[in-house]
Image (cartoon, rainbow, N blue to C red):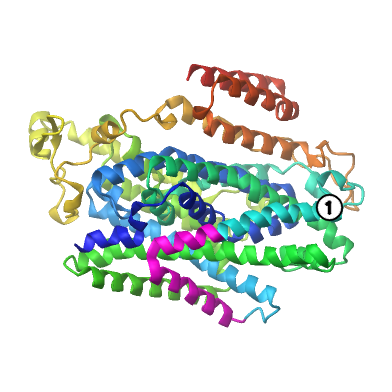
Amino acid sequence: PPEDSLPRHYLGGRSFGPVLTAGTMFASFFSGYTVVGVPNEAYRSGFLSLRWITSAAIVGLGFFGTAARLRKLSLVRNHQSPVDFISDRFRSQILRYTAVTFQIFPSIIYLTAQCTAIRTTFNSIFRLDPNNVGAVIGICLIILLFEFMGGLSCVALTDAVQGFIMVLCFIILPIVIKKNFGGWADLDLESYPRQDFYQTPTSSEQWLFWNFTIVNFCFFSLPHFLQRTYAAKSLGALKFGFNVVTLGPWLTMLTGTFIGTVGVQMLADAGIENPPSPFGAILTVLMDLGGFPYFVSCFSFTASLAAIMSTADSLLIAISHVLTAEVVYPIWPNASPRRVTIFGRIVSFLSISVALAISILGGKNLSDLAAIQFGLSLQLLPVFMIGLYAHKSTDCHPWALAAGSWLGFVTTFSLHYGYMKGFNPEIDGPPFNSGVMGCAVNVCVVFIIEAVRRLSSRKKDTAVQEEDETEMFVDERDDKVHPSMKPREHQPEWDMPHISRFGDVALTPDLVWKCMEGVREPFAESWFGVLMFVLTLLVTPLVGADTPPLNEDGTLAFAPSVVRGIPSWAMSIIGFTALMTLIFFWGKFRFGFVLWVVNMYHHFVAASIPYSISIPAAVFLCDICVHY
C-alpha cells in the first residue's frame, strides 16, 4: 500500500541502530550555526554566548521527556508522520493542520538559514563574490540528490560522516589555538581589547538569557527530530542518541565560545578589526602560521560546510515527509507507491527552491525570521505536553489547543515586529522574547476556552452527554472498554481525520498512560519538572548589573572576579548547566555517583553563589537522587 512506502523512504524502515541514530541526531542538531555562528557571537558578545549551552541542555530536556512516549506510541499506533501523534490523539483536522503549519513554517525558515550559511561559508572559503549564488545552488542540488537516492537512510549515513568531521574539528581546533595563542587563563585582562566581556550582564541581558534558555524547549517537535525518534530501531538506540546530543554542547558550543573570546585577542594582535566573519578571520590567522595549523584551518572550513549541509538535508527530507504524508497523500490516497515517491521528490524540489529563493532575495528580512523561528515552534508545546501527559481530568478540547496555538503565533509575530524590532532597552522599556510571551498567551487562551467549555457543559445532563459523546469499543486484548473512533461531542464530520491505520480504539489519555506502564519516566514525576524549572532559574546569571563598571577609556574600574580566566558569573552558568546535564543521567548511576555529583557541585558552583542558595539546592538534589 502507498502508506507502507512512507516509512521505508522517510523513516529508514525504522532500522537505525545506536551509532547511526547518534550520528544523524548529532549532525542534524548541531548545525552550521554551531560551527560558525557561536564563535562569531562569542567574538561580539563574549561569555553571553554560553546561552547556547544552556539552551541546548533544555533541548535535551524536551527530547528526554517526550522521545520515549512518542516512539512507543508510534509503534503501538503505527504513526508514520511527525503529525500522526496529534492526529491520532486529538482526532481533529483543525488541530492536525495547525500542527502541520507550525512544523513546516519554522522548518522552512531554518532551511533558508542553512542555504544562506552555505552561500556565505563557501564564498568565504574560496574568496568568491559574497553575492555569488552558483555555489549554493550546486550544493543544494547535491543535497537534493542524496534525498532522491535513498531517503532518510542515505541522509542519515551522510549525517554520520559529517558529524564525525565536526567532532574532529572541535577536538583539534581549540588545541591548536591553545598551543599557539594560549587559552582563557593566559589572557591579560589589562590589555584585553574587550574588557566589557568580564562585566556582569545587564538586567535586560539576564532576562533575555533566561528567555532564550527555555524558548528552544520544543525543539523536539520539529519534524526532522521526530523523524529520528521514529526511525530508531530500539529504545536503547534512541537513548544512546539522546546521550550523544546531551553531551554534544560541551564539545561544540563551549568550544565555540572559547574560539570567539580568545579570537578577540588573536585578531587584535593581527591588526584585524570588526571582520564580517570573525570565525573565518580567526582561521585565516591560523593559516598564516603554516604547517599543521594551516591544515587544521582548512579542515575546520570543511567541518563548517559539513555541519550546514547535514542540517539542510535533514530539514529538506523532513519538510517533504510532512507535506507528502499530510497534504499529498490525503488528496491521492489510492496512489501507487511509485507515484507517492514521485510526489515526495517534487515536494522536496519545491521546498529547496522556496528556501533558496527566500535566501537569495530575502536580504535583511532573514534575520527577523530567524529570530522567531523557534518561538513559533514553541506554540506547539501545550499540544504535545497535554497530548502526552494529560489525564482524563486535565485533557483539553482540540479546538481550544488550536485557538491557543494560533493566538500565540499572532502574538509572537506582533511582539517581534511591533515591539522588539529595533528595540532599545534604555528607551523602550523591558525586553521580551516574543516566542516565550506568545507561548504564555497560548497557555492562557487554552485555559480560558477550556474553562468556559467545561462550565457550559455542566448545565447539561451528564448521562445524556456521555451517551452522545462517543460509542464504546471492547478491546479483546485487555477486556476493557475504550472509546471508539467516533467524533467528539458537537464535532462535525469534516473535522474528523479519516485514518484507518491507527486502529479502531481512540488514543485516550488513559490509553497513553497504559502504553507506558513499566517504563521509568522522570517527566511523569511532578518533582522532576519543578527541579528542572528551578535549575533554569539558577543557570541564568542573577547578579548585579555592569560590575565592575567601565572607565571612560573602556577599561575596568577594578579587577573582576575570575576563575581560570573565566568570569565567575560565566563559571556559574557552566556549573549549573553541567549539574542539569548530570541529572539527565541520574537513572543510570547509583548513589555513589550522586555523592560525586554533589561534591563537584560544591567545589565548582557553590563557590560562586551564596550559600543560602547553594546548600539547600545540593541537599534537595541529594534527597531526590537517594529517594529514587
Is 134 in the magenta?
yes
Structural crowding at the residue carrying mark 1, measured as other residues with C-alpha within 10 Å and reported as few (<14), some (14–19) or many (≥20) = few
User: Mark 1 — residue?
Assistant: 179
Please indicate whether residue 335 sits to the left or right of residue 564 in the image.
Answer: left
Residue 583 spot, x, y in % from top left = 55, 31
Question: Which residue occupies 83% across, 36% down?
Answer: 561
Reply above or below: 366 against 377: below
User: Residue 477 location in percent, x, y?
Assistant: 15, 33
The quarter of the rendered structure image containing the N terminus is bottom left
Q: Give the prevailing secondary structure in the magenta stretch.
A: helix
| Residue at x 9% of width, y 36% of height | 472
Q: Position of residue 336 (x, y in %)?
A: 20, 70
The magenta segment:
132-161
| Vertical comparison of 418 with 202: above or below | below
**In the rendered view, does 536 fall on the left or right side of 544?**
left
Please give the name of the residue rendered at 46% of the width and 39% of the height, measured from the top-left corner: 64
Query: Taking 39 as reference, is 505 above or below it?
Result: above
Residue 211 in view here? no
Local SS, label 1: helix
In this view, the residue in front, 463 or 180, is: 180
Q: Going 74% across and 30% down the picture, which residue do you hit?
A: 608
Residue type of the residue flagged with mark 1: Lys
Q: Is residue 314 left or right of residue 270?
A: left
